[in-house]
Amino acid sequence: MRRTNRLLTMLKSARLQHATLALFTLVVLAYAAIALRSIWRVSDQVLENAASTVGVAALTGFGLFAVSALALAWTMSGTLDRQQRKLTDLREREEQFKEQTALLQSTLEHMGQGISVFDRHGRLLAWNSRFVELLELSPPAELPSLYDILVYQARRGDFGPVDPVGEARERIEQFYRDLPSVRERVTGDGRTLQIHRHAMPDGAVVSLYSDITERRAAEQEMTEARKAAELANRSKSDFLANMSHELRTPLNAIIGFSDVICSEFLGPMRDRKYLGYINDIHSSGLHLLSIINDVLDMSKIEAGKLELASEIVTIQRVIAESLRMVSERAQRRNIELVTELSGIETGIWGDERAIKQIVLNLVSNAVKFSHDGGRVDIRAVLDPNGGLVIEVEDRGIGMSAAELERALQPFGQANTGAARLYGGTGLGLPITKGLVQAHHGELTIDTTPERGTKVRVVLPPHLTATAAESDPAKAHAPSEPQEDRAVA
C-alpha cells in the first residue's frame, strides 16, 4: 500500500513538471510572436539596412531570453520535484512511526502486566491501562509525574497516616535507588502486587506490576496443607506407637500362654484337637505381632525417627541365621538356597537387627515368589571400591516396571493377584529400602516378568570392616534381643 501511494505521488509530480514546462514554452512562443510582429512593422518605416540590424539584434536578444527562461523553468521544476519527494518521504516516515507506535501501545495493552516508564525527572513517559487498573489511579493526564501519583496515593491512605508531600519526596528518592529491585505490596482491596524495577541507560526507570494474589493464596494453601499433613503424620506415628504398645501386651500374653499349652507343661491335653487349635492361636499371634512391628517400623522410617545401633555385624553370620529361618519354607517347595560368600568374615558397622531384617526380607521374598523346584542365590562380596555388596537373585515370577514402582510404595503389591496368592502386607521392600538408606547404602532392583528378580544392596566403604581387623568380642557379641521376622 505504501509503495503504491509513493508511485502515485511520483506520477503526480511528473505531470506537474511537464505542465510547468509546457506553460513556459507557450509564454515564450507568445512573446516571440508579439516581438516579431513589432519588428516587422518597424522595418517598413526605416531603412532596409537599419531594419535588418535591429531585427538581428532583437532576434539574438529573444533567443538568449528564451534559453534563460527555459533554463529557469527547468530548474524550478526540478526543485519542486525534489521538494515533493522529500515531502512524500516525510509523510511515509510519519505513517510508519504511527504504525510502530500503535503496535507498541497494543503490545503494552495486551501484556497482562502493568508497565510504567518514568524519566530521570519523574515524568511519566509510557504506561498501559493495566498499570492504571492495578494501582487504581486517575487517568495519566491528571497525574503526569511520579510526584503527582505518589501524592495521590498518600492522600488516599495507601501508605498510612503520613504527610503526603513529605512521603512522596521520600519515596521518589527511594524510587531511583537500589535498582534493579523486586518488591511486594498489598493494596487497599487486599490484592498482592509484585513490582520489578530496572534502570534504563538514560536514567529512566521501567517498572512491571504483576498481580500475584492467586499465587500467594495457593502457596498459603500448600503451606497449610503441608503443616496439616505433617501434623497428621505425627498423629499417625503417635497412634501407631500407642496402639502397638496396647496390642503387644495382650498379644504377648496370648503367645506366651499358648506356647505353654502347646508344650503341655502342666500336663497332656486330653483332646488332641484342642492342641491343634492352640497351635493355630500361637502362630496367628506371632503373625499379628509381626505385622504390628512392621507397621511401626514403617511409620518410624517415614517420620525419620528410626534409631539404629552402631556395632560391627558379621555379614556371614547374619546370612546364615536368615537362611535357617526360611530354610523350612524353601524345603517344602523344593527350592534350593545357594550362597556365595567371601572367604574372610566381613563386618559391617550398623544395626544388627536392621541388617538382618534387610537380608531376611530379601531372601523371604525370593523364596516366596520363586517357582516350585527353583533356586535362590545369595552373594556377599567386597566391590573394587571397598564397599560391601549383597545380592539376592531368584528365577521366579518377576515384575514389570509399573509393578516394581507399586511394590516400593508402603502397603503396595506388585499386583492384586500376587497379593491373594502369596499374601503379605506389602511392607517388605519399602522397609528394606528405608533400612538400606538409613545405613547410607543403595538398593537397586533388576527384574523381568517371568524371568526373576535380582536385588542388589551396596553399603559404602566407610561402613565395612573385616572382622579380623575389629575386636572379635564386639564382632560376635550378642545384640539386644529382638524378634527376627520376614516381611512381604
Image: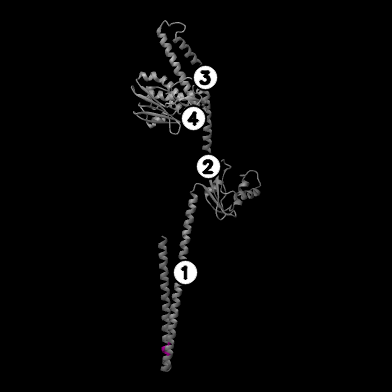
Q: Nearer the viewer, mark 1 or mark 4?
A: 4
Above-or-below relation of 149 to 357? below
Q: Quadrant of the C terminus?
A: top left
Determine which residue is flagged by label 3: 245
Determine which residue is flagged by label 4: 463
Determine which residue is flagged by label 2: 212
Point out the stretch of residues depicted in magenta: 38-42
Q: Judging from the image, what secondary structure is the residue with disc 3 in? A: helix
Q: Residues within 10 Å of mark 4 (few under 14, many from 20)?
A: some
Tell me which label, 2 or 4, sits earlier in the chain: 2
Q: How many marks?
A: 4
Question: Which residue type carries mark 4?
Answer: Leu
Left or right of 336? Residue 431 is: right
- How far apart marks 1 and 3 lie (CA) works out to 103 Å
Question: Which residue type carries mark 2?
Answer: Ile
The label shown at residue 83 is 1
